[in-house]
Amino acid sequence: MPKITGAQCLADMLAGYGVSHVFMVPAVLRRTLAEMERRTKIKRIHTHGEKSAAYMADGYARASGRPGLCMAQVIGALNLAAGLRDAHLAHSPVIALTGGREPKTKFRKVYQEVDDVPAFEPVTKFNATVDDVSRFPDMLRQAFRVAVSGTPGPVHLQFRGNEGQIDAEEAEMEPLVEPQFDRVPPFRPEPDAKSVLAALKWLQDAERPVIVAGGGVRASGAKRELVALAEKLSIPVATSLNGKDSIPGVHPLSVGVCGTYSRESANRVVSRADLVCFVGTETGGMTTHFWAVPKIGIPAIQIDIEPEALGRNYPLKAAVLGDAKIVLAKMIQNADAKTAARREPWLEQTRSICGEWRAKYRPMLESDAVPVRPERMCAELTRHVPDNGIVVVDTGHAGMWMGGMYDLREPGQSYLRSAGHLGWAFPAGLGAKCGAPDRPVVVFTGDAGFWYHIGEIETAVRWGINSVTVVNNNASGNQSKRGFDRVYGGEQTEKARELWTYRMVNFARIAEDIGALGIRVEKPVELAPAIQRALKADRPVVLDVATEIEALAPLAVS
Ligand SMILES: Cc1ncc(C[n+]2csc(CCOP(=O)(O)OP(=O)(O)O)c2C)c(N)n1
């Protein structure tokens, strides 16, 4: 076997796994970056911070289903680790490569060095060091294998040398790639046949069942099967926020997102159900409104690829271990459509609950008020996001507004959400556009969220990453208003507002200055033409909407 350098091996292997972009702040693995230019077509996206590089890799991974790559030298490693936290919470397959310590010099007060490895432990599935160049092939293969297998998640490899200079060394190596692990899911484990029939029996016997679908449905590519089963048996479908794109919001069986950043109708339906069927959801706090919706003790069945997830929060009548797409297909095959008639009164009830929700919020969804209401922004996005669009949503109020008020219209649309980190959506949207370049990407963020990584407008312009970023700009982080009202005993002092308000800034002007298209909207009638213009522009766009600072998103359970 001929000798090659670590850099050549790494560049060839990443290309072999189909990696099209890496996101990083130099200088790390410099020789590898040079070899990428010589030997591959990989784009080396040089960002304005390691955290946003990690968020871009995360958006890339969630949009494409393929591992997203991000990198940092030793001094940037913890910034990168901070950025893996959302990917970890969202089960997104991100591979982080960092520079690390050199055994010859460690403990001698080396410039910029601390032991970074422990900080990656809580946000990764696999956290390892590469200390000998001959280990490049097997360690990289393991990184891909772990990132995409089972419940996907982040992986960290630390390379010897503060900038990963180990990549200059040579060894006899074969840059062998296992294409099976270049995307999610690498395996589709078959369920035990008896467990499928047992779960199906519970579902068919129920009079008021509801399905709660999570992000596992997207990971498995099981949307079609989920909707087909719900249709065959007449079962309403609620989703977690992460699973919002499991079923279009306009589908007659969709009742909306349940849990905390949610739609009231979904929580009303889930609360009244006599059986809950969880599919690809970890039944976490946000999906269940901290285990109040549904209440623990409700008859429940669960389908998941991860044995540890089955029954973690809700004792189960039946548990099915397997790939969601396969399990649901088997349930459809065995389902008795005649049992659907039994659920007609329940469907009638759920339709009326959803109708009441629409009637209650229609005035806000159609509001002509100035400053613009966020609900109206969501309604305009429902109308104008293209049929193959990917919507990428920040957390906080952005998550509440879009989770509750925005509807996907088509099965070809996707919805990606921050798992909790403010500021995630704008860089994640850039990564999503790199991961799915043929699909329109529309980001929804508040102004506080947008400020975090505003420098990445320059990255978008430099690389021609043409996402549309819609900013709900109320010159504040007004989701915090309720919380501060409370601690001030009901009414805040003028000075209290300094805890959550900002200057009103025109982001469209900033975007224009940096070379993007900036569009400022101040009236609701301007929204539709602005969104259409943004989508046609084929440039990075910042659509800055001046909105009502007093607008507070409705709470989950009223
Ligand atoms: C990293 C991080 N820090 C703090 C928070 C807490 N937080 C949630 S929403 C929010 C303010 C959101 O403001 P903005 O994005 O402008 O949206 P608005 O509430 O004004 O609609 C804050 C500070 C968080 N979610 N993540």
Image (tube, helix red, strand yellow):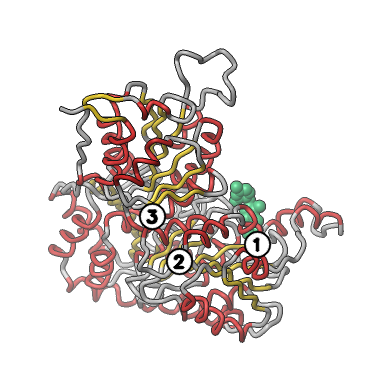
Which residue carries the number 2 mark?
391
Q: Earlier in the sequence, mark 1 or mark 2?
A: 2
Count up the numbered dots. 3
The answer to whether the residues at label 3 and label 2 have Cβ atoms under 8 Å apart is no
The answer to whether the residues at label 3 and label 1 have Cβ atoms under 8 Å apart is no
Q: Does the Cβ of the disc 1 residue fall within 8 Å of ligand 1?
A: yes
As drawn, the residue found furthest toward the right would be 494
**From what the image shows, is residue 444 above or below residue 154?**
below
The answer to whether the residues at label 1 and label 2 have Cβ atoms under 8 Å apart is no
Q: Earlier in the sequence, mark 3 or mark 2?
A: 3
Residue 160 image-quadrant placement: top left
**From what the image shows, is residue 123 above or below residue 408?**
above
Ligand 1 shows up in the quarter that is bottom right
Is the C terminus in the top left, top right, bottom left or bottom right quadrant?
bottom right
**From what the image shows, is residue 315 above or below residue 137?**
below
Could you tell me how far apart the alpha carbons at marks 3 and 2 are, in whole angstroms? 11 Å
Residues 193 and 393: in front is: 393
What percent of the width, then of the height, locates residue 142? Answer: 28, 34
Residues 113 and 90: in front is: 113
- Secondary-structure class at tag 3: helix
What percent of the width, then of the height, locates residue 68? Answer: 38, 48
- Secondary-structure class at tag 2: strand
What percent of the width, then of the height, locates residue 355? Answer: 47, 80
Residue 491 image-quadrant placement: bottom right
**Relative horizontal placement of residue 345, taking residue 405 as reference (left or right):** left
Q: Which mark is residue 447?
A: 1
- Secondary-structure class at tag 1: helix
Q: Amino acid at mark 3?
A: Arg
Q: Which mark is residue 62?
A: 3
Residue at coordinates 28% horizontally, 46% vertically from top-left? Answer: 15
